[in-house]
Image (tube, helix red, strand yellow):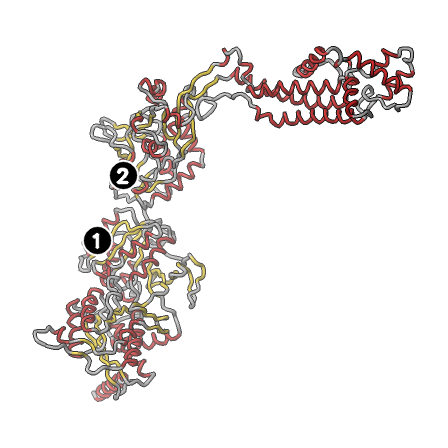
Amino acid sequence: MQISKWSLLIMIMIICVDQSDGYNATAAKADVGFILDLNQTIGKIMKTCISMAIDDFYSKQSCNTMIVPHFRDASNGSVAAASAAIDLLKNTQVMAIFGPQRSIQADFVIDIGEQVRVPIISQATSPLLSPTESSHFVRASWCSSSQAKAIASIVKNFGWREVVFVYEDTNYGSGLMPFLSEGLMQINALVSYQSIVSPSAEDDRILLELYKMKTMQTRVFVVHMLPNLATRYFKMVKKAGMMREGYAWIIADVLTSLLHSVDSETIEAMQGVLGVKAYVPRSEEVRRFSKRWRKRFHRENPEMERTELDVVGLWAYDTVTALAEAVKSVGVASPRFKKPVGGWNLTDLEAIGTSNSDPSFIHLIRNCKFKGLSGDFNISNGQLQPSAFEIVSVYGRGECTVGFWSERNGISKELKCDDEVQEKGNLGGILWPGATSIVPKGWEIPTSGKKLRVGVPVKKGFTEFIKVERNQESKAITATGFCIDVFEEVMRSMPYAVQFEYIPFETIDGESGGNYNDLVYQIFTEEYDAVVGDVTIVANRSNFVDFTFPYTESGVAIVVPIKDQDRKKNAWIFMKPLTTGLWLTIAAFFVFTGFVIWVLEHRVNKHFQGQVMQQVGMIFWFSFSTLVFAHRERVKSNLTRFVLIVWVFVVLVLTSSYTANLTSMLTLQQLQPKVNEVDDLIKNGEYVGYQEGSFVSGFLMDNMKFDSSKFRIYSTLEDYDVALSRGSRNGGVGAVVDELPYIRLFLSKYCHKYTMIGPTYRTSGFGFAFPKGSPLLPDVSRQILKLKEDDKMLFITKKWLGEEEGCSSPGGAVIASESLTLDSFRGLFLIAGLSSSSALVVYLCVFMYESTCSFKKKICDLARVFCKEKGRDLLSTAADGRGRGERGVAQSQEGMFSHDDGFSTTEPATPMHDNHIELVQMDQRSLF
């Protein structure tokens, strides 16, 4: 018994020494109130950290002031917290209040502090509590909205498109919702459902809500609740069978930071859950403090089992340190409060008055920055600024770090002390619910849920694309056609099973329920989960739904009738291959080429001599005879041969082109559209037809500027044929405007009667419609792309749309070739003209150079001599000197072009020259 008394005495002494460590009896007492939830683990952790912060601060330095803590319990709710605050202000006259922890409690206390001008320092994380709106409120923790981007980055990292947000029905729980929605929208994801759980909800109620979520498609859940509710909730999650493979769970801070406080059964139920929490650097100082804290905590709370220090406790430690520095700077005011003047009929709160503390006191608390145990502790404008988040996975008996997130660098696998990121965009190995390493795809069609409701259009015509039939006995819906085959092939190719059913868009009497805009809008009103059919992707429809990639060609085209021009009965068809201008150019070149050849051959070739009419005839005959290569006259000049080589090539090209074009005109049927341009339709007031229910009507008015009074609606291919055959004057139309898939199908059957004209106006083609943000959309689009690259798409197209038999052109009737124009042979004539002209110029230059007379006489002599056959004049006047003299003259006139071509080169004083002058004079008299 004596030993027990001594042991008790020693313990009391140790406690007293420990509590009095750093105590300065002469220091001014700064009373500070601490309102904590002392029945909860987090409250006890914070109390120990607060006490240690006060002891550590004053044990390291001598101060004229000293914080005296006054703890109050707020575990009984908001009224208890408000009462504790009024008691501290009225009876203790505290300089500041730390707490409460809960957002709903802090909301009351903040209003009280604002009225009495006393700083309220709280770790409440709800964004609904704003330091900018309350000048005496300081948030000593990260706002829960700061984690929204971190959670959104995790969702983006795994390619999820939808999440279910589960939160407790408090200010703390609902405060994250708008920020999470905004963060998800920035990554093209959304919150598909909100599950609100009351903190007082019974387990059966929670289980019922879980079964409801189990029937939904989304398999990614974000949970935002405090540990008390989360403990019960995740036990029910496991009981509902929602902790198996395919599910993904993400928990928010503060729950992640307080995982150490939940029981082992809850940890077992949370295996594979991801969480985010504030990152605290593992410094040596933190490790030493944790060791000291653990000893003191278990000494103060011996009944508590395994408990770990968390970031909330470190923030409390750093906050008290910042508060002590502020008190040291401003001192303690006396009196503490300024009482109101006239104290009649005042409430307890009004009777307190307002704080007399230095105005800089609140400023020092709301704006401080230093290196604390929690890292960079930076309070700016009353808000503790966030830095990096740690991403953890619940595994085994606790948690393991799989990555980090920061505003600057996003997700990373590792994070250095200076926030430098390594392996950006990656996370460590994660064991997901169901003990699998396979990343959940984020959604699935629940077997116990509804089938995918696929809306299909009901239409009379164009059944090759889609046809809906109802069995009169079983009332079962059967859909067939090109669009249906494509959709079903895509569904079969999906990496998972998708159950669906077709629901026709029709009225009670089986008629179409409206146009395609009305059909697509049914997805927005949640009547359908998807729409399949010949639905065109247009901008106004994309405001309500999301479309897959198009699975058909795109474009809007115009079809018009053709007129048959049977040129085989035309007597002048042989003139049609060439235009009039080309005919005249050819004729001119024939004459010009014949003239050049006559000039070059006239003096040396007897075939190009004689009477004037004979020589003119030779000019035409020789050039035109080259058409059939029938000329028999031999040419003697090399210049002539050069001209002929080029000209024969020109003739060969011209005759070949003429023959080909004439053959085309005689063998192919000549078909011409009745209208060549879109403007002609508008100018002539033609009626235009389009398909019932199509968006083309608006396209005609907005893009093509047609008058809506000129529109006529049709439902089948046969209607198109009849309307085009009649024409606008007989109750039909002058043209049909529709999308390319329909036009191709129409021309495949009527290609000999109609053809496409004008430009093809681009559209986006056919696509399948889904609700905005549908998780099905990326997978369906991916399978469409694969299908278009496969032979299956070609097989489906041939099966339903067939091939254009008997049509050589996909645009309809073939328009035969037109007459050839001069532009096609401009280069050819240029070569022929240059070659002939150059030969003529060379000949004339040489001819004039070799004459020695004056220029005027030279021209006259040259004209006379040119009209004579070389050597013939000598034979007619000097027959007796024919032998040697004739040969001399002939030899003297041989030139460089041939053995018969040349000019006289004898000297003027020689007898031969004199004889030549006399002969020329005689010839001049005979010529003129």
Q: Is residue 240 left or right of residue 919?
A: left
Q: Three-letter amino acid code at disc 1?
A: Leu
Q: Three-letter amino acid code at disc 2?
A: Tyr
Which of the 4 image quarters holds residue 539?
Answer: top left
Q: Position of residue 485 (x, y in %)?
A: 36, 32
* Element at label 2: helix
Q: Position of residue 300 (x, y in %)?
A: 25, 77
Residue 790 visible at all: yes
Whether 545 is drawn above or below 506: the answer is below
Q: Is residue 556 left or right of residue 337?
A: right
Which of the 4 image quarters holds residue 777?
Answer: top left
Which numbered disc covers residue 207?
1
Which numbered disc covers residue 521?
2
Q: What's the residue at 25%, 46% (across, down)?
A: 215
Of residues 417 and 808, the one nearer the viewer is: 808
Q: What's the residue at 32%, 35% (across, down)?
A: 532
Q: Residues within 10 Å of mark 1 (few under 14, many from 20)?
A: some
Q: CA distance from mark 1 to mark 2?
A: 35 Å
* Element at label 1: helix
Residue mark closest to the camera, 1 vs 2: 2
In the picture, the quarter occupied by the N terminus is bottom left
Which numbered disc covers residue 78?
none
Q: Position of residue 520 (x, y in %)?
A: 29, 37
